Structure formats: structure tokens, C-alpha cells
Amino acid sequence: MVFVKHSNGIVALFKSGSSVLTVLGAFCAFLAVGCGRSTDTAENLYRIPWPGEDGKYSLQAVPLTGFDQPDTLQGRYVQIFVNPYARNGQIASHTPIGRFVRSKEGVLVPADYTSLQAAVVHAHFERFHRMNQELGVELNWPVKVGIRSQVKDRWGVIRNNAIFDGRLDTLLLVPFVSKKGLPIALNAGILAHEHFHMIFQHSVLKRVRFKRKERLEVGGKFSEWSSGHEELSSEAKTMAAEEDPSLYASLFNEFNMRALNEGLADFWGWVYTGDPDFIRHSLPSESPYRRLDVKVKSLLGREWIKGMVFNQVTEKPYSEQILGENIYQLGSTYARVLHELATATSEDEGRSFESRLKFARTVVKSLPSFARATMKAEASGDYVSPNTFLRAIYENWPVRDDSVCKLFKRIAAADEDSFSDELQCSSAEE
């Protein structure tokens, strides 16, 4: 989930470099078209907003091979739902309608905003599928994505966000109403962020059960509409941990895992785009807190994290709202540590996708170990140290020489987990 404060406005704009184009204006600018129907070919080109090597977005002709049914917005890698709702615990919607026209050059151009969002989502998830094949990651394809999703939390209808709902196994893209910025549904880094949540759900969250029994993925209860449909809600079913101190360690471990999930998802956004500040294109106010190219002294230790979970005066857990905000603060620490490790130990400082993919593979290999350590802590009532994940990362890091050892030693959290003391950095390791 991309956590942001609510704001009001009208969907209209996306940025292309320093200029701002309205979506309809962009269509008009590039729509020197003949109004022939779109046809399926082995590979079709779609005119959609796409990031360049400099991170700036412009309209480009992007090839898609898996967008098989553009008339209903469906394809091999994505199942699109428009204005979705839940029915019997499953995501559903009316059959979407895709509208495209073919330009004189043979490029397919979306003729409405829903079709534009769908084409962009298909393009990126087609590439995520290839990425997963490279990494040996398994997901249930086609993935489910809701466009124009109306999702509520306790404060009202959510806007300017993207939410992966683990119970529905669906990415929900809610309306983007900011007057400035690239709509979230068109932001490559944010889509990659949500793609990682799918991986984390499959690799970790399905394996770990917490004593507090709060669902870690966003999305929870379903309330009946009079129509018989179920309302999409981001409210989570919780147990009152503040009334039962025996659940405090479980709450801590849950908080730490949620933070790691968000931090790794931001790291994944960088892996895919090469842009350490991909969030600024859509949510510039979040950039200072989320951009990855900010060095941190070290991971936060258990006592520091306890201060994010428990009020030091009352010694009881903070409210869900405060915990939600603190999750992203801790998550950014994880993301920035990994970004520093990757750029410092890569031959090209992570400039090429191939070099970044090596570190993505390291993350994937480390997830089962972290899941096992968390399950062990849950069984014994212990608090998981952030060093648990750092140790797993180190064991799978593609290069482990003396300089890498010293970098990990500096970054290790200072707590009772003795990972830093375990590292012997006087000589290179094989």
C-alpha cells in the first residue's frame, strides 16, 4: 500500500518532464488517427505514458504481447475489473469495455482514461512476469487489478492510493484526484511496489500466523450493500492487544513485518525503474520520507522499534493510525539500507537493470529465512530483531568481500542480536 494523506481535486493531469499535459490533451496531441478497429497481432504497440532512462515520463509507443483482449481490457498477465466490488469474498465487476483507435503509424491509442490505465497496467505487469521468471518467483497469473476502485476506511473513501488486498488477492487502484502529478495507475515504480506486495504475500504472509491474528495485508472486513454486493474496505480485523500484554511481542513482530513489506516494496520500485525517488512523480509530498537515496547510520534496533509500537508513558500500544504511519518510517529505513548496500557493492552503482536484478534475487532468496525466524519468534514469544533479515540478506548477497563485510557490520542494528559481532571482516570471504 502507498500510504498518503487524503487530498481533494480533479483527475486531469500527468507530468512529462517539466511540462504538464491533460490526459485528453495528450490524446489530441497524438491522435492523428484513422478510426479503424484494433486487431490482435503477435505484438501491438500502444501509445502510453512511459518512463525514460532519466525517470521522466513521456508518451511512447510501447510493445505488448499479452494484451490479448483489448476490447474487454483482458490479457494473459492481468485480469482487469472496473468499478469492482466483492461478492462472496471474491472480486467482481461488470465486463469492462476497452476503447482504442489505431493511428496512421499503426499504434493503438487509448480513447478513454480507463483504457489508458488498463493498457499501462498490462504493459508493466507483462514485464513483471518476465522479471518473476528471471527470479524464479511464482504468482497466480493473471493477477487481478481493480481500476476506479471505491475503497473505504474509517475516515471515508480513499483517494490517491494503491492497495493490495491479500484476502481478495487483488491490487485496487483508487481514483487519483490530485491536481498535479502522474496518476498512481501510470507510475511504474508504484506499480512495481504493489507487485512486490503480491510476492511478499505469496512468499511470507501465507506462511506466518500471528498470535494477535490481525491480517497483515491491507483489506479486511466486508460490509453488505443493499444491492447484495460487498463493500471494499481497508479496515483490518484486530484484537485489542493493549488489553493483553501477552500479545505485545506478537504485535511488535507484526509491525516489523509490515514495515519490512513496505520497505522492500519501495526497494522493488527502484529495482524496476532505477529511480530512487519514483514516488515524487505522483506524491511529491511523500518524497522526503520515502526516497531511497538517503543514507542511514544503521538499522534501528529492537528497543527503537518498541518506541514506535508502544507509548513510553502508558506502556501500551499506539493507536492503529499512529502504528500505520510509523510502519512507513521504519520501512523507509529498510529500503534505504538495501539501496545503499546495492549501490555501494554494484559495479555500476545499480544503474543497469541487470545489476539491480541481482539484488532483487537476493531479497527473494532471503524471504523464506525471515519467515521461518518470525514463526520461531511467534512460537517462543520473542521479539524479532531487524538483524534477522539483514543476516539472511548477507548470506545471499552476490558479493561478500571485506568491504561488503564492513558495510554490513556498520549497518547492523545495535541490539541483543549479535550479528555485527559475528561478522569477521579482516579478510575477504569466498
Image (tube, rainbow, N blue to C red):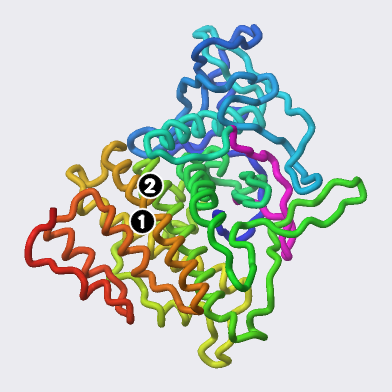
Residue 270, numbered circle: 2
Q: Quadrant of residue 22?
A: top right
Q: Residues within 10 Å of mark 1 (few under 14, many from 20)?
A: many
- Residue at image point 75% right, 51% down: 232
Q: Position of residue 236 (x, y in %)?
A: 68, 64
Q: Nearer the viewer, residue 70 or 61?
A: 70
Residue type at tag 2: Trp
Which labelled disc corresponds to residue 292?
1
Q: Are marks 1 and 2 in contact (CB under 8 Å)?
A: yes
**Magenta residues, start to end:** 142-161
Image coordinates of residue 259 in percent, x first then y, are: 48, 64
In the image, what residue occupies the spot 23% across and 64% down? 408
Residue 160 visible in the snapshot:
no
The quarter of the displayed image where residue 69 is located: top right
349 horizontally vs 234: left or right: left
Real-space Cα separation, disc 1 to disc 2, in angstroms = 8 Å
Residue 423 on image: x %, y %: 19, 69
* 77 lies above or below 145: above
User: Residue lying furthest left in this view?
Assistant: 427
Residue drawn 47% across the image and 80% down it:
306
User: In the image, what residue type sits under mark 1?
Assistant: Leu
Q: Residues within 10 Å of mark 2 (few under 14, many from 20)?
A: many
